[in-house]
Image (cartoon, rainbow, N blue to C red):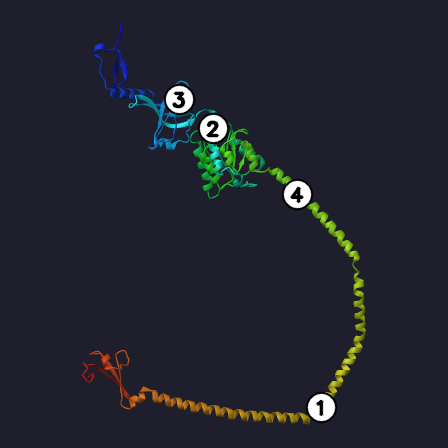
Amino acid sequence: MPTDFSFDPETGEIRDEAPKGNLTEFTVTEISHALKRTIEDRFGQVRVRGEISGYRGAHSSGHCYFSLKDDGAKIDAVIWRGSFNRLRSKLQEGLEVVASGKLTSYPGKSSYQIVIENVEPAGVGALMALLEERRKKLAAEGLFDAARKRPLPFLPQTIGIVTSPTGAVIRDILHRLADRFPRHVMVWPVRVQGETAAAEVVAAIQGFNAMVQKPDLLIVARGGGSLEDLWPFNDEAIVRAVVASGIPVISAIGHETDTTLIDHAADWRAPTPTAAAERAVPVRADLLEQVASLRARQRRAMGRVLQERRLRLQSASRALPKPDDLLAIARQRLDAAAGRLPQSLRANVQRHGLALARTSGRLSARSLQSRISDTRRRLGELQARGSRALRLVLAKRQERLTAESKLFASLNYRSVLARGFAVVRDAAGKALPLASAVPPGAKLAIEFSDGTVAAKADVPTKQGSLF
């Protein structure tokens, strides 16, 4: 006997309890909404692997519409504008991806679709294609040019290491540094795998560069792994952080055969983390041996130089005359001069004695008295002439003083007061030349030739009188 079915739009369940003649009637919208709730409740968040099909970029609204397909089926996909702008992977037609999102239905077409929130390349082939595309883009910007790579310090005082704080990598680097040439090491712990790894490595590089006491060298390292494990070090943000770093960077990612984009951007690429430590510092014992060898070579070279100079000096000394030969003529001259000296001294004394005798013959008491008399006469004449000149100067100064005294007396205002005039002053002692300058009631002082009288100004008359 055939079974009748019924559909519950609230729960999305299909029942066979209702008789055929009593089936509930639903609208198309009700059925669509019930299916939508069933799909979303049943599946929720899913990860779907497939090939991108019908991709034409973002719509004018900013949303993106395409399909995911495999060999047996095809599903519509949509990425809303906010999620599309946050995608880390670039979408392209035919790329195999793993899309994370939720299933839902689109009632307008009676179809279901996946609303994608994140997209990751699927498979090594897709990752390699994406890696090559990103490498070409960054290389075109000149970020991998050899000309911009900086030389590494010969012996850094401080080394900054960006890696996981656990595992063999950090131990290998520290042990190798300690064996070769112990240095001060600063470790910035980061995740080296997973979604947050790239952001943490970028923050570590920028953090080291922001320090006041910066390291002299940075090592970014992690152990080997698959392409997916090493994928964070192909992130564009890490490449740009390494290029912008003011500190030289050594990259040591994976094994010798592993290559990531950070290797192209770093100032030096180490095949292994241990090789990075070896490149960072020289071997102290080798340096000491080299210094000792150079010191020995220096001593030998100095010995050869001194021996050569000694031989040259000996050869030159044989060509020089002996000191006795150089002084022989001078000694003879000295002896000859010493032999002539007593005779020369006697001749000199005799010559000066004769000159003294001739001079003393001209000197007598009479001549000396005559000279003294002449000197006294000339001195008296000079005194007389000086007295006359002094009296003449004093007379001229007296006449000038008398004339100036008369001029001062004629210009002195007190001479005017003696002729019957007076000087009117205000309370501050300032002379008042005009009656119009005197305000009524002002206190005045009137100075006569024989004294001063106090007064008070009244209203001026038409003739200008103040009293």
Residue at image mark 1 = 362
* Image quarter of the N terminus: top left
Inspect the image, locate mark 2, and give the three-letter code of the amino acid beneath it: Ala
As drawn, the label of residue 69 is: 3
Residue 310 in the image, given as x and y percentages of width and height: 75, 52
Q: Are marks 1 and 2 in contact (CB under 8 Å)?
A: no
Residue at image mark 4 = 294
- Please tell me in which quadrant of the rendered image residue 281 appears: top right
Q: CA distance from mark 2 to mark 3?
A: 19 Å
Residue at image mark 2 = 129
As drawn, the label of residue 6 is: none
Which label's residue is closer to the chain start, 2 or 3? 3
Which label's residue is closer to the chain start, 3 or 1? 3
Residue 291 in the image, given as x and y percentages of width and height: 64, 42
- The residue that appears at 43% across and 91% down in the rendered structure is 399
Which label's residue is closer to the chain start, 4 or 1? 4
**Mark 1: secondary structure:** helix
- The residue that appears at 68% across and 45% down in the rendered structure is 298
Q: Are marks 2 and 3 in contact (CB under 8 Å)?
A: no
Which label's residue is closer to the chain start, 1 or 2? 2
